[in-house]
Amino acid sequence: MDDDEGEVHGPVETGAPREDGTGGQVTVGLEISQWKYLSAETSDPQMHAILSVRVDGTEGGGTPGPVLAQVLAVDCSSSMTWPPDKLHAAQQAAVAAIRKLPDGTPFAVVRGSDTATMAYPDVPGTARADARSRAEAERAVLRLVAGGGTCIGAWLDLARRLLAEQGAPIGHVLLLTDGKNVNDERMPLDGVLDACAGRFVCDAWGIGDGWDGHELLRITRRLHGSASSVREEAALPGEYQKLMDRLLTKSVPELAIAVTPMAGAAVRYLKQVFPTEVELAPEGDTQRFVTRAWGDETRRYQLCLSADPSGHPRGEDLQLAVVTVDVPGHHVRLPTAQPCVVHWTDNPALSRQTDPQVEHFEAHQRLGEAVAAATDAHRRDERDLAEHHLGRAVTLARAMGADEQLHRLARLVDIEDAQTGRVRLRADVRPVDFQHLITASSHSTYGPASGTGSATGAAGAAGAAGPGAGTVPCPACSKPAPAGARFCPFCRHPFQERP
């Protein structure tokens, strides 16, 4: 490779068969987007890259027999008694989910309070979905009565034990709560999450006005799920139906991403950044990261590698790490291994640039941090500080072209100037409005945004760069320049502002 190549950003064809020659309808694609230039003078050089992993063809490549085992954990603490529509909405949502279960699916319903008990079936265990069991479960759900406290750890622990007793490849827990985990001492959540990690996927929903968004994210980020909420109780059954529709398309239980660093490099972290934020921990002493429950979809991951320039030449591309993906136990077509590279340079015009996808997702993380800081400030009744942090969130959302986040922020503040972050906190804002914003902020957008926000640079000058493209050719020297640059790092040609 030579000094004219600005970025490693190559779509990888998914036609490479497994070494065992089995092939199959399921295919996996891998793309790596990075800006390879680093300064050798930096005290702690770090290379960031976005890995895009896509799975296709899962509808025809499923495992024989039931793929999913489902546990519904329904909050029945005393706070669910008011308003009366709250428990009714929770019951209707659970019924809607039960009706979606295909015949043969192992399932159970857990009644959650300061303990966890079986709502259906009557004894600990799972039932197999059919017309009779679905009808029995519906009747059991509609008989649920609220009372007691809240210990979410107990609910998840019972779900873990129920799912461990059946053999479906994908275990899933759908958790609903309207309150905070006030009885945590009965079964501390931290220890339960340690026991549950890797055993099943958990999606969690908040309802009412007393739940804690940070708590839901703590659960779902650890258990590879997503946190969501509804403002109106009546919307919950429809949301459960849509979630179950998406869940039932998943037939690949897990996909592993392996990162092999070269000498002088090390993996700092790998985390999922799209469509939701998920924590990933390597298996044992390896750099193999397992992701859960795939259908036909694309997910994106941020990889951070440390790098040491000592003893390495300047002015050429060097392999920093190799990334591979695998789907254990499935006949799939896998992409070839892909490199992350580094190019040590003394040119600050090159080393100061950032890959646009990396920049987008780091901005999204800063947006989430601003929302969290605003929530804490509002809780302490520091309205001016809450306004400041929400103004920062508005500025970030505008720059990212994140219209949905801007719309949600506008529920809390009157936006006077989005570019400068001048906002005014609405007088009718409630604490729960911040909780809705916290869960919504964990759902990221595909980036970098195209044709929105205040993006300027080479993309506007050179024309079409595909969605997520990291570089575009300079119109003056034709060398690859970052899509968000204001000038070419090679010939210094200025780029016009994007229309």
Image (cartoon, rainbow, N blue to C red):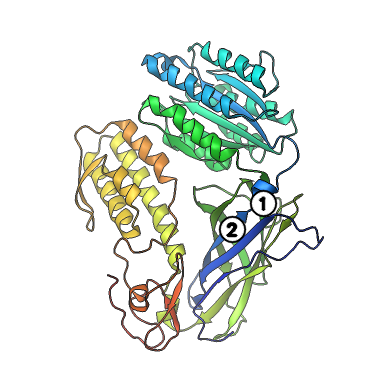
Q: Which amino acid does label 2 sit on?
A: Val
Which disc is residue 307 wearing? none
The residue under the point 25% across, 48% down is: 388
User: Could you tell me how far apart the alpha carbons at marks 1 and 2 are, in whole angstroms?
Assistant: 10 Å
Q: Is residue 90 above or below residue 423?
A: above
The residue under the point 56% across, 61% down is: 51
First along the sequence among labels 1 and 2: 2
Residue 153 seen from this side: no
Q: Quadrant of the C terminus?
A: bottom left
Q: Mark 1 points at which residue?
A: 255
User: Going by the image, does 344 lie left or right of 81?
Assistant: right
User: Going by the image, does 114 lie left or right of 404?
Assistant: right
Q: Which amino acid does label 1 sit on?
A: Leu
User: Going by the image, does 237 lie left or right of 396?
Assistant: right
- Which x, y percent locates residue 278? 54, 47
Circle 1: element type? strand
Q: Which of 446 and 21 is in front in this view?
A: 21
Q: Residue furthest right?
A: 20
Circle 2: element type? strand
- Which x, y percent locates residue 385? 25, 44
* Number of residue marks: 2
The residue under the point 43% across, 28% down is: 236
Place residue 194 in its image quadrant: top right
Q: Nearer the viewer, residue 167 or 422?
A: 167
Q: In which quarter of the image is the N terminus?
A: bottom right
Q: Is residue 415 above or below residue 69?
A: below
Q: In this view, does 263 lie above or below 280?
A: below
Tell whether label 2 touches label 1 (CB within 8 Å).
yes
Q: Name the residue under label 2.
A: 53
> Dot 2: within a 10 Å radius of its alpha carbon, few (fewer than 14), some, or many (20 or more) residues?
some
- Which x, y percent locates residue 467? 45, 64
- Which x, y percent locates residue 232? 35, 27
